[in-house]
Image: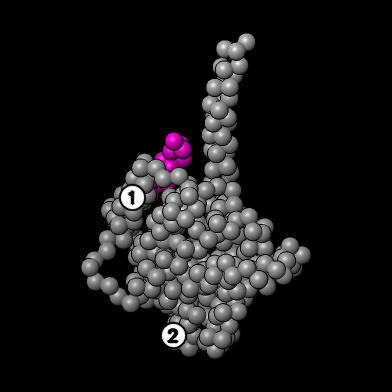
Amino acid sequence: MCIARVRVHRAFPAQTSAIGEVAMDSTTLRALPLMLVAMALIPLGDTAGKLLTAAPLDGGQGVAPVFVAWSRFALGAGFIAPFVLRLVKPRLFADWRIWLRGLMLAGGITSILTALSTEPIANVFGAFFVGPILSWLLSVWLLREPFSILRFGLICLGFVGVMLVVKPGFGMTSGMGFAVLAGLFYGAYLVMSRAMADVARPRAMLFSQLVIGAVVLAVPGVSAMPPATLPVAALTIVSATCSMLGNLLLIMAYRTAEASRMAPFVYTQLIWATLLGAVLFGAVPDIWALTGIALLLVSGFASLAVRRR
């Protein structure tokens, strides 16, 4: 009887670990479709933003990036308010972390739209991808998510893919500086989204960031409002809607799975940015860019095979 008891006692942790591995894989697989769709919608919204800021739609010049950023937050908040107000507790806005998270996103969106007004979309997204690297490192450090040499290698492989797509030179324009700044803001936002995933429901979290962005950008955004035309209105709505839906799905994905497991899939934004750039702006990827995209796919999907050790 004693031996049997010892065997059961020793087998139980192993069985629990196996169940944990299955559950972990299940949560990752549930979060993955949300993440991939979000990563397609966000560059689509940014492409609409580039068309607004770079194209001569406003009396022969582009719309001010700060207006496009503000309109995303303001329209997004208006779109979802009827569906989420009952879920949003007033005390949510008393949490300073909610405001800091909202400021990170507002800064990131304003910065990337400023970069897109002067720089090619693929280059902007390449510089922007300092964000996922920062997100992974901060998640391991601050959120105590597990560190893995293999996972670190996959992150580095994805970054090599980014470099092959972007092929950056040593010159640094102000536009690319804004792209890097956007990535830093975004990396901090991703980590805060994961850290605060249990503070409120995803729709309430989305509404809070939209309201905060609309408030902090209201004065410069309204001051830069362009004349109302059909192209400006249509692109503004597309930009706001894609950004809102993409961030809602992103919040839901980070509520489901670890930030460090989702980080490689953020690279799929660059794939969409490259494709949209080719279709809408004539920037056809060369063989090096296609190789980089392949490395990004390998990096992202190989992360599913990494197990917590």
Spatial CA span between label 1 and label 2: 39 Å
Front-lying residue, 98 or 31 = 98
* Image location of residue 171, percent across then percent down: 24, 71
Front-lying residue, 159 or 285 = 159
Q: Residue furthest top?
A: 1
Residue behind mark 1: 156
Classified by dominant secondary structure, the portion drawn in magenta counts as helix
Q: Tell me which amino acid carries mark 2.
A: Gln
Q: Is residue 125 visible?
A: no
Which label sits in the foreground, 1 or 2? 1
Residue 61 falls in image quadrant: bottom left
Q: Residue furthest left?
A: 170
Residue at image location 52% in from the left, 77% down from the top: 68
Q: Residue furthest right?
A: 86
Residue behind mark 2: 61
For mark 1, give the secondary structure: helix
For mark 2, give the secondary structure: loop
Q: Tell me which amino acid carries mark 1.
A: Cys
Front-lying residue, 241 or 126 = 126
* Image location of residue 20, percent across then percent down: 56, 34
Residue at image location 58% in from the left, 22% down from the top: 9
Front-lying residue, 202 or 16 = 16
Q: Is residue 233 magenta?
A: no
Q: Is residue 296 magenta?
A: yes
Return the disc, 1 or 2, that comes first in the chain's sequence: 2
* Image location of residue 134, percent across then percent down: 40, 59
What residue span does the magenta drawing correspond to?
295-309
Q: Horizontally, is 100 left or right of 280 in the view? A: right
Asked if residue 112 is positioned above or below residue 187 in the image, the reply reads below
Residue 88 falls in image quadrant: bottom right
The N terminus appears in which quarter of the rendering? Answer: top right
Q: Horizontally, is 291 left or right of 191 in the view? A: left
